Amino acid sequence: MSENTIQVRINQTTYTLPQGATLADAVTAVGIQPPFAAAVNLQFVPRGQYAQHALVNQDQIELIAPITGG
Amino acid sequence: MTIHDLTPDPLVLYGEHFASRLMLGTSRYPSPSVLLKAIETASPAMLTASLRRQTGSGGEASQSFWNLLRQANVPVLPNTAGCHSVQEAITTAEMAREVFETDWIKLELIGDDYTLQPDTLNLPEAASRLVKSGFKVLPYTTDDLVLCQRLVDVGCQAVMPWAAPIGTGKGPINPHALRSLRERLNVPMIVDAGLGLPSHACQVMEWGYDAVLLNTAVALAQNPVSMARAFADAVNAGRAAYLSGAMQAQDSAQPSTPVLGTPFWHQA
């Protein structure tokens, strides 16, 4: 990791993103297709706020999608 | 008020009316097509669904399931399965609300991984915070009367006690507790988890429960579609029996056929 990058965990996999990256950048990096929802450090982030939600080093990001359930 | 069907005896939850008193899980079926046929056969009030991390080929499976839900056109009840803390459950519920575009949430807060028993100490706090956030909370709970009362106290308009641990199919393992609970609480109650046979579903409906929620008993049947029908029929039969008012059991035999006029009676 350089001074110009941050490391974040997305669905338990480490990604290196540029400093100033947002949640929208993280979503793009993973390539997840809708429908899905996001949380950063166990806090829900509404879809409309991805581009404004700045990430910091070591953020834990969860991107989850529908599956079967009981 | 949303009216899903103008049935004469609807299930009413949070002011919404449902024609069916059966709720069906969507997991563990042999195939998506079998699941869809089971849904079409049972016509459930709601379908449960969940959220998980998308990894590898999981994206295709998720998209396929999403399309199936849209095709089924049945209200979705997302769950918080696997959550072990209040914050996990709340965040998962918020994510589910956005994905499934619904305020309904089946609140699962697991306290023990072996029995999948709910975290009874923290369940009311989770339910309270979700209710305050506008969710229509259906909490998966044990059959503990005081706990269920607390859930009602914090704003749950219905509760979902287990019959037995999830996926066991044992049927009601503590009939006394379930019957006492039904007699003491005056809110809609749905028996969730542990049912294995249609007779189990019929039994709890006869006791006055308002609905049942099940998954494995249908999904793991040799013929899930036929079993879905059997459970739907059992739920209807149990409900009809409850509304009909069952006779009181007697210790001594009572002849069904009138004794008066019996031929050869005391002839000797």
Image: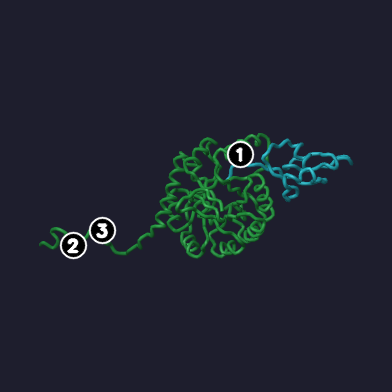
Chain colours: A cyan, B green
Residue B97 percent coordinates (x, y): 65, 48
Dot label at residue B66: 1
Outermost residue toward the right?
A3
How crowded pointer 3 is (Cα within 10 Å; few <14, some 14-19, many 20+) is rated as few
Say what amino acid the circle numbered 2 marks.
Answer: Leu
Q: What is the chain letter for disc 3?
A: B
Q: Is residue B192 left or right of residue B51?
A: left
Q: Secondary structure at mark 1?
A: helix
Residue B99: image location, x then y, percent: 66, 44
Kind of residue sitting beneath label 1: Trp
Q: Nearer the viewer, residue B210 or B161?
A: B210
Which chain does the residue under circle 1 lie in? B
Q: Are marks 3 and 2 on the same chain?
A: yes
Q: CA distance from mark 3 to mark 2?
A: 12 Å
Task: Name the one closer to the observer, B113 or B46.
Answer: B46
Residues tagged 1 and 2 counted as in contact (Cβ below 8 A): no
Q: Residue B95: percent from the left, percent from the top? A: 68, 47
Q: Are marks 3 and 1 on the same chain?
A: yes
Q: Are marks 1 and 2 on the same chain?
A: yes
Q: Are marks 3 and 1 in contact (CB under 8 Å)?
A: no
Chain ID of residue with mark 2: B
Task: Please name the residue that numbered disc 2 is placed on.
Answer: B260
| B268 and B184: which is toward the camera | B184
Residue at screen point 60% across, 48% down: B78
Mark 3 or mark 1: whose residue is earlier in sequence: 1
Q: Which mark is residue B256?
A: 3
* In the displayed structure image, the side of residue B147 where residue A45 appears, left or right: right
Say the numbered circle drawn on residue B10.
none
Instruction: Tell me which label, 1 or 2, sits earlier in the chain.
Output: 1
Secondary structure found at label 3? loop
Other-residue count near label 1 (Cα within 10 Å), few / some / many at <14 / 14–19 / ≥20: many
Q: Nearer the viewer, mark 3 or mark 1?
A: 1
